[in-house]
Amino acid sequence: MIHIIETRPTDDNENRKNVYITPNSIYLSIYLIYLSIYLFYLSIYLSIYLSSIYLSIYLYLSLLSIYLSIYLIYLSIYLSIYLSIYLSIYLSIYLIYLSIFSIDFFG
């Protein structure tokens, strides 16, 4: 018994996936950029303003208030820089992931 298998030539564009940039992915990327800027501002505000000013006022009466306030200012600046770098890297990776997912989902 002879089996005949019929094949057809495939088009090169048949297996390619079309990539579309939808308005949803553009709005999502703009929103995430705005969110990263807001989180950067919030981290600086919370770390510098709240920790250094309020805690230095409360520790003003003690002998170590000057050293503690200097340390708190140093710590707040360090944390704001660290948090802003960490959040920007994390949000950019998340933005890339969501833009790829939205292209695959809507494409």
Image (spheres, helix red, strand yellow):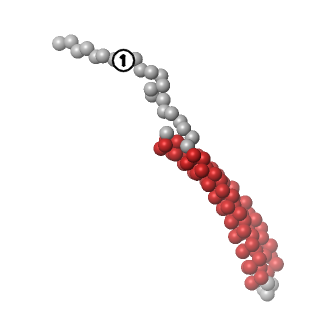
Total marks in image: 1
> Which residue is found at the position 34% from the left and 17% from the top?
7
How far across and down, in percent of the image, does residue 25 sit?
57, 47
Label 1 sits on residue? 8
The image shows residue 98, relative to residue 42, as above or below, that is: above
Between 28 and 39, the residue placed more toward the observer is 28
Residue 71 picture quarter: bottom right
Between 93 and 11, the residue placed more toward the observer is 11
Q: Which quadrant does the N terminus fall into?
A: top left
Q: Quick one: which residue is furthest to the top in this view?
A: 2
Q: Quick one: which residue is furthest to the front in this view?
A: 23
Asked if residue 88 can be seen in this view, the reply is yes
* Secondary structure state at the residue bearing disc 1: loop
Residue 75 picture quarter: bottom right
The image shows residue 2, relative to residue 85, as above or below, that is: above
How far across and down, in percent of the image, does residue 26 sit?
60, 47
Q: Is residue 93 left or right of residue 10?
A: right
> Which residue is found at the position 54% from the left and 38% from the top?
20
Q: Is residue 7 left or right of residue 90?
A: left
How far across and down, in percent of the image, does residue 91 sit?
61, 53
Asked if residue 93 can be seen in this view, the reply is no
User: Mark 1 belongs to which amino acid?
Assistant: Arg
How far across and down, in percent of the image, does residue 40 sit?
69, 61
Between 14 and 51, the residue placed more toward the observer is 14
